[in-house]
Amino acid sequence: MSINYDFITAAPVVPVLVIDDLDTAIPMAEALVAGGLPALEITLRTDCALDAIERIAKAVPNAIVGAGTVCNGDQLRACRDRGAQFIVSPGSSQSIFDAAKETALPLLPGVSSASEMIAAMDAGYEILKFFPAEANGGAKALKAYSGPFPHVKFCPTGGISPNNLKDYLSLPAVIAVGGSWITPKHAIQSRNWDAIRQLAAEAVVLASD
Ligand code: 3PG
């Protein structure tokens, strides 16, 4: 069975969302999609994350909703049950690999070392999340990893902002970047969805410059 990775090429930036209030899930997703960023990573860091995934999957037709901070196979299956279309994990384990294969969901396994990259490649993955990107040497480190691993593509996240976005996206190995800067807490708290739409649109322009 071939697994569909179109979510990662849908836009150059994948917003990483921490949803504390379920009522913000739909308007936030709509704002991001309207700004040009349809692939959304909802992190399992809050009590309402699974409900948020389900709501967005049902109510925002142009969103490609995925789950992030998935740390074991049971969480991965729960995300599938709520409608997640892709899975992002900060690291990897056999239970995550097994559940991803069982559900046929595309997985971006998190890696931050050559050994983790080899383990992920052994499990059949060639598109990896480099995390936390800035703390692990940033674009310079990623460029170095492309020497021994020329076929691997990366979606770096962790510490990425408009200031360093281009450093990553200019590397041939980088397929997209992830980050939370597009959904700042103050904009969510003040329900300023237009500000979030604008940040998404600015990220799209910056990425294509
Ligand atoms: C992630 O889970 O990918 C990161 O927490 C996102 O990192 P950022 O908040 O530094 O963008």
Image: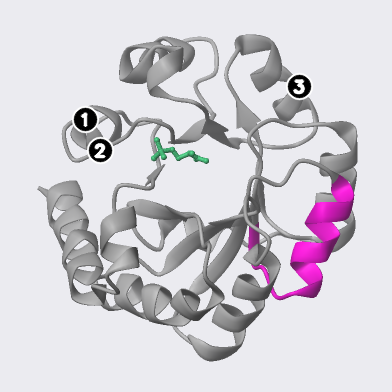
| Earlier sequence position, callout 1 versus callout 3 | 3
In the rendered image, which residue does mark 2 sit on? Answer: 161
Q: How crowded is mark 3: few (under 14 residues within 10 Å), some or many (20 or more)?
A: some
Q: Name the residue under label 1.
A: 164
**Measuring 44% from the left and 75% from the top, which residue is drawn there?**
24
Quadrant including the N terminus:
bottom right
Q: Is residue 80 magenta?
A: yes
The amino acid beneath tag 3 is Ala
Mark 2 within 8 Å of ligand 1, using the beta carbon: yes
Q: Residues within 10 Å of mark 1 (few under 14, many from 20)?
A: few
Query: Residue visible at 43% across and 24% down?
Result: 133
Q: What residue type is labelled 2?
A: Ser
> Residue under circle 3?
119
Tell me where residue 84 sits by quadrant. Answer: bottom right
> Where is residue 123 drawn, in percent x and y?
80, 33
Instruction: Tell whether label 3 touches label 1 (CB within 8 Å).
Output: no
Q: Distance between the residues labelled 2 and 3?
A: 29 Å
Of tags 1 and 3, the one toward the viewer is: 1
Is residue 171 at all visible to an observer of this figure? yes
- In this figure, what is the number of numbered marks? 3
Quarter of image, ligand 1: top left
Helix, strand or loop at mark 2: loop
* Prevalent SS, magenta region: helix
| Left or right, residue 138 beside residue 69 | left
The answer to whether mark 2 and mark 1 are in CB contact below 8 A is yes
Q: How far apart are marks 1 and 3 (CA)?
A: 28 Å
Span of residues in magenta: 73-86
Question: Can I make out residue 142 in this image?
Answer: no
**Kind of element beneath mark 3:** helix
Q: Which of 109 and 147 is in front in this view?
A: 109
| Side of 172 relative to 80 (left or right) | left
